[in-house]
Image (spheres, rainbow, N blue to C red):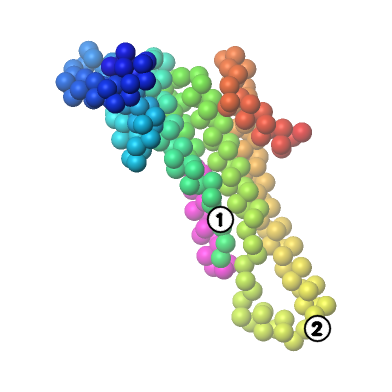
Amino acid sequence: ADMNYRAKNWKNAMGAYEAFIRKYESVPEAGPWLVKASFRTAEVDLRLRKLRTPKEAWARTIDLYARLVNEPGSMSAEYAAHSQFMLIEKDMREFETIKIAGPQKSLDAKIKAGAEQVKAFEERYRDVQKYRRPEWSLAAEFRIGYAYEVYAKALLNIPPPPLDAKTTKLLKTLSKEDRDLVLVEYEDKFRAAMEQYVTGAEEKAKAEYKIAIDLSRQGNISNEWTLLAIERMNAYDP
């Protein structure tokens, strides 16, 4: 299987890895090789560009590691950490498009739901760090900060909710100049109210980026996640 993989003979590699997993997946002694084989099927799946995603292979890799290996810091943990990280990344792609808007009655609930989503991402990325693989721990730390930054930007972009019917009716009785002044004041008050949420999310993002940078220095790691953490930190504190 590995020979086919190195030779980029993807279809044969996939068949060989799957056959190995079927034959030995209940044998504890084969754990490290099963975890590697399962992870490789995900990589092959990506290279073949199949319609299905490697989600099942990543999940299987995590399961095999937990059942048969469970050795943080090991090479098997590397494959499991990578798999877990990639599973979360697919959800992160969706979260990046978050938009918060609506009438005041529903806005508070949407803001709370966004905060809960960020917290859930933080918990999931923390699970990646339990494998004790330095590069994936760093990547997870960056993503935690990034989740808070995405949320902060969504908060900044919330449009002021529509005025209630009574206020809208009252505005119609005012001159255009007075009406414009009322609307500007209304938007300013709304932005001021949102500022506490934005500031909290941004401070959390900065704190996590700093931790990521510290991790990279401690582990002497220089990769894309190091550069991204430095870039985002500099965006907040030039």
Q: Secondary structure at mark 2?
A: loop
Instruction: Looking at this view, name the residue that lies furthest to the bottom.
Output: 173
Instruction: Looking at this view, name the residue that lies furthest to the right.
Output: 177
The percent position of residue 34, horizontal first and vertical second, equals: 27, 19
- Residue name at image x 58 percent, y 26 percent: 224
| Amino acid type indicated by mark 1 | Lys
Q: Report which residue position mark 1 lands on.
A: 99
Q: Earlier in the sequence, mark 2 or mark 1?
A: 1
Marks 2 and 1, how far apart at CA: 34 Å
Q: Quadrant of the N terminus?
A: top left
- Residue name at image x 62 percent, y 30 percent: 228
On whether residue 110 falls in the magenta region, the answer is: yes
**Left or right of 135 in this view: 155:** right
Q: Report which residue position mark 2 lands on.
A: 175
Q: Is residue 27 visible?
A: yes
**Left or right of 100 in this view: 128:** left
Tell me if residue 203 comes above or below residue 130 in the rendering: below
The percent position of residue 43, horizontal first and vertical second, equals: 38, 27
Q: Nearer the viewer, residue 200 or 219?
A: 219
The percent position of residue 207, horizontal first and vertical second, equals: 63, 33
Mark 2 in CB contact with mark 1 (< 8 angstroms): no
Q: Quadrant of residue 74?
A: top left
Foreground: disc 2 or disc 1: 1
| Amino acid type indicated by mark 2 | Ser
- Crowding near the residue tagged with mark 1, few <14, some 14–19, many ≥20 C-alpha atoms within 10 Å: some
**Left or right of 205 in this view: 174:** right
The percent position of residue 25, horizontal first and vertical second, equals: 20, 22
- Disc tally is 2
Magenta span of residues: 103-120
Tell me if residue 18 comes above or below residue 235 in the rendering: above
Q: Quadrant of residue 64?
A: top left
